[in-house]
Amino acid sequence: MSNTNNQAPVILNQPKKIKLDMSDRIIRGFTYVLVTLFSIACIIPFWMVIASSFSSEEAIRRTGFTLWPSDFSLFSYELLFRSPDQMIGAYVVTIGLAVVGTLIGLFVISMTGYALQRKDFPFRNHIMFYIYFTSLFSAGLVPFYLLIKQTLNLADTYWAILLPLLMSPWLIVLMKNFVKAIPHEITESGKIDGAGDFRIFWNLILPSMKPALATIGLFLALAYWNEWYYSSLFLSSKVPYRPLQYHLYNVINKVASLKNSIAGSKVVVEDLPGETLKMATATIATGPIILLYPFVQKYFVAGLTVGSVKG
Amino acid sequence: MKKLVALLMAMLMVLGCVPALAEVDTSEHVVITYLVTGDIPANRTDEVLAKINEKLTEKVNAELAVHWIEWTDWTTKYNLALATQSGEIDLIGTATDWLNAWPNIQKGAFLPLSEEMLQTYAPQTWANVPAENWELCSYNGEIYLIPEDEYAQWTNHGFLYRGDWAKEAGLENGVHSWADLAVYFQYIKDNKEGVIPWDANGNGSSYAPQMAGGWQTSHTPNVYIEGIGVDLFYGESKDAPYTLSNYYIEGDELVNFATEMKKWADAGYWRTDVLNYTGDVVAEMEEGLTGAHQHHTQTWTGQRTSLEKKQPGADVGFFWFGEEMGNVVGLNITHGAMAVAMTSPNPERALMVYDLLRNDPEIYRLMQYGIEGEMYSLDENGYIVRPEGFNDSTDGVSLNWWWGRRDELELRSADRDWEAIDALYAKYEEVKINYPYGRVVFDLSNIQMYLDNLSNVYNTYMPRIVFGMVDDPAAFVAEFRQQLKAAGIDICMQEIQNQINAAYGL
Amino acid sequence: MAKSKPVVNDQLSYKKPSFWQLLVQNKTLILMCTPAIIFFFVFSYMPMPGAYIAFTNFQYNKGIFNSPFIGLQNFKFLFMSGQLTLLLKNTVLYNIAFILIGNLLQLMFAILLNEVASKWFKKTTQSMMFLPYFISDVLVSLLVYNLLNYDYGFISNLVRNMGSEMAKVYQMPNAWPIIIVLVNLWKGTGYGTVVYFAAITGMDTSMMEAAQIDGANGFQRIRYITLPTLKPTVVILFLFAVGGILKGNFGLFYNLVGNNSMLFKTTDIIETYVYRSMMNSFNFAQSSAVGLFQSVVGFFIVIGANAFAKKLDPDYALF
């Protein structure tokens, strides 16, 4: 893909700077101000979450949040890592699910998306409707639970998490829409060369849709990363390690249930932090994604502004 | 007559000989799965369970496995597990108040237990539970539940308060009424800088019914009827329990409550935005930031000790709802109960296991306290003492056995203030009545949609009444009542009255 | 309703191939769709008959299909409540606000950032905008509470320090539509912008170059090139969102508002109402009924919207 190619000499050759007219300047000025403001609005609360997670529970009792760790404390993190093997296991399981699920999901979604946007594919609307319909009607909790537990017998296996999240109508439609932007001539030229449909998809289309793959891939990975609902329904104590978010969710809940135990009378209430623990879990759950995001981002920010593209 | 013979037989069995069990075919080793709410323990539970299983294998050739319903979304998961069972669970911990045992029985989640089954496979339990209690566990003439009827516990609500501050406020004997409570709160407001008298986290949905019911039991002789789902239904009094009270449809007491709470809100006894506050009252009390916590008696027994460590001299007392009127009801014997799963492949063996868990002293103590000598020891009073540095969440055992505890086998924790606790329990015993509605099992299917709408009205209006977030209390209560009428409270009261009448032959 | 004329290539249009011929001709494309077809069959269509539960008095020991049929009984409570109009109004209005303002903002950020040359600026701001997506509703509600609560809130303290009187925000129903929409935008904009970014990134760059050479200015480029390219994406996002117009985000509303009924007038949606009503009576059948009701209404709205989109341009339609 040549448009990711963005070397310095190319930029230097651009006539852009000279041609910057009034409207460009207005747009840029406006963009810088607006985007900066919004970004700050996004980062400050997040920073407060991190700062509070390193504070003691007492320090943030009344105000709730702090801009700088007050009364520095690692207690929340100690509690989270009290059983480090659980935490590490949770990370491994989640990363494993996210990687495998994203790869399989991406492959199937992009293949389907490509086929469904082919105008010469007569069944495309029927299949699209068949897929889309499922986003409107769902069977509801009990039938789905019965399906996973009894029909497919997937309860207490990681398949129960991996499979349902593989794809969604929404991602397929999005993918279809992205692929549509790829000129039909590519398909045509492939046909002329005598390539089959799958070969056209695999050799010609796939390499030219990196931004779309990155987007859908990101969404898939995030879905796996944030997953706790299916885990909570289908993974019992028979599974040694549960996905990260569910693990964290349980830690928080455990604290809550210890403190307000419904029927337990002999529960020893220790000094369990409530608020800072919530902050710490948010920090832990978000950290790795923030590290990963720049790699994915490469494809969105690939310098597609007019000037930087060379042929 | 038959029952008497059975009883005799059962007693004979208890007295040493276990011959009856010999008739039962236990040649095949089975795993009995027990479904229970609670988090998967990260302490020494597995280790202890292995020991328990050794004994169970030896005695009935079975072992116990636990199916945890973790607290995250537990209502959904618990009910799903019951609704979709297919032979993977055998024993189910349940309760008629907080785990909807009756609706689940009506929906067919549990196996009916015949008297013969209980006699044969749970002989000790059968012998210990009196016939009238079995009757309270029956629906349509069949027994479905094994009650926790040999265990005294108190989970009636009230206020935990600081005895030291109460004394300073001039309440020499502590807080014993809502009026005292107002004095106590006002004293804190006036004299304790930075302390919120009661920093209630009004966001919790259980506060409204607890507080509203608290005022009601303190100011009327009304008796709460459980298992209907909306806390609008009370009996008139202990002398006339089978007549429904009109407290929520007419009368001044509810208006008085709303008026008083508005006064408290205006006086700043809790924070302005109490309805959205989610903070941790217990921790605040430990830090001296608030002066009260609304919770139940069991909580108080623990907090009395633990708060003393954080706030020496706090002398935490308990004002219980209903104290003014001496209006307190003993806990229903099915506040904890065990049921056998409808689809259990081994119901007989499940009962045998249950019988041992409940009655075998050795197994019982393993299950409740762990390994003696290692995880606990007994002091000269026979109270339980944990080793130095013992932490229940890493060193203890948690099998959440809330479905068949027995006072006879329980051990008292040495670090609790038993003098104070026993004094309170004695007071309770003196005035309490037994739960009077044990025999009626409501069939709510005909009025469920009215109840759901009443639940909405209740949960819309009551939090504001409870925390005084109203302009004109009388007008607000009138509006509340009018909404209740519109949602069908009359129809529901009629139906519930009819079912009570039918159950008690009135 | 799924019927639509198959678009056939010009070369083929002189003869009308039979269904089987079409199947054979397109076997590769069909095969490429097969994994997805199987997936949705298994995970969506197989359990679908179970939606029958909404019409039963569900008995655990009998299973869904042997439980007694009780017609529309499970739907009744929602209609009897007298609240339905308010709930529908709130749910729909919030969704419209989320969809319209949300997409507008996402679109704007994507386009504007695309015009900026500094890669560093783009990367950093995009990452920052993504962060709120990871903050759970529970934490968001804590943040909002700690900003706005009357006694100790951050903003309350600021206002007081400036010598003014703070408003009791948690007693002002009219403030909450704004707060909730803002929170929703704050949470979702970074995530949503990615979609438009990808669409812009994937667009035909030769057009842009040509426009630049022709001397088109920034506004013109956006107006005549970027926006038209994004139009199909906008339409599809919109169509998708419309299907869920009656479905509310329970987590967001419940955590922000809780049981503060002083705010219900402007914040109560179907999900929160159902939660309050069925808090203590666990009833799978009744919750399925509510879900079914929301789906059916959404379905008809989507069918209408899709037909409308098709009229504008057959390419825009979802199916």
Image (tube, rainbow, N blue to C red):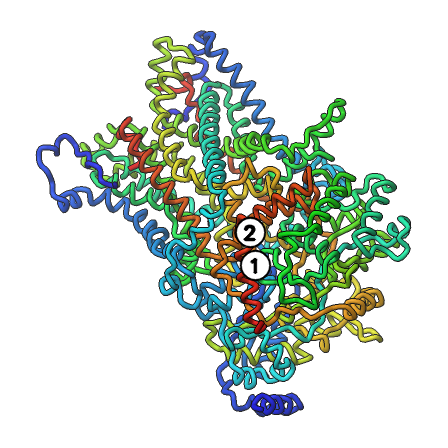
Position of residue B139 measured from the top left corner of the image (x, y, whole percent) = 52, 73
Does residue B377 appear to the left or right of B450 in the view shown?
right
Query: Which residue is depicted at the point 66% across and 69% down?
Result: B435
For the residue labelled by badge 1, is the local secondary structure a helix, a strand or a loop? helix
Q: Amino acid at mark 1?
A: Met
Count up the numbered dots.
Answer: 2
Residue situated in front as seen by the camera: B74 or A31: B74
Query: Which residue is depicted at the point 55% across and 82% down?
Result: B118
Q: Chain of mark 2?
A: B
Position of residue B34 measured from the top left corner of the image (x, y, whole percent) = 55, 70
Q: Can residue B201 be seen by looking at this rendering? A: no
Disc ID at residue C83 = none
Q: Which residue is mark 1?
A: B493
Q: Which residue is mark 2?
A: B454
In what quadrant of the picture does the N terminus of chain C appear? top left
Q: Amino acid at mark 2?
A: Leu
Residue situated in front as seen by the camera: A272 or B1: B1
Up the image or down, C34 lies above or below B340; here it is: above
For the residue labelled by badge 2, is the local secondary structure a helix, a strand or a loop? helix
Does residue B489 appear to the left or right of A105 in the view shown?
right
Up the image or down, B372 lies above or below C319; here it is: below
Query: Which residue is depicted at the point 68% across and 79% down?
Result: B362
Position of residue B385 measured from the top left corner of the image (x, y, whole percent) = 79, 69
Q: Chain of mark 1?
A: B
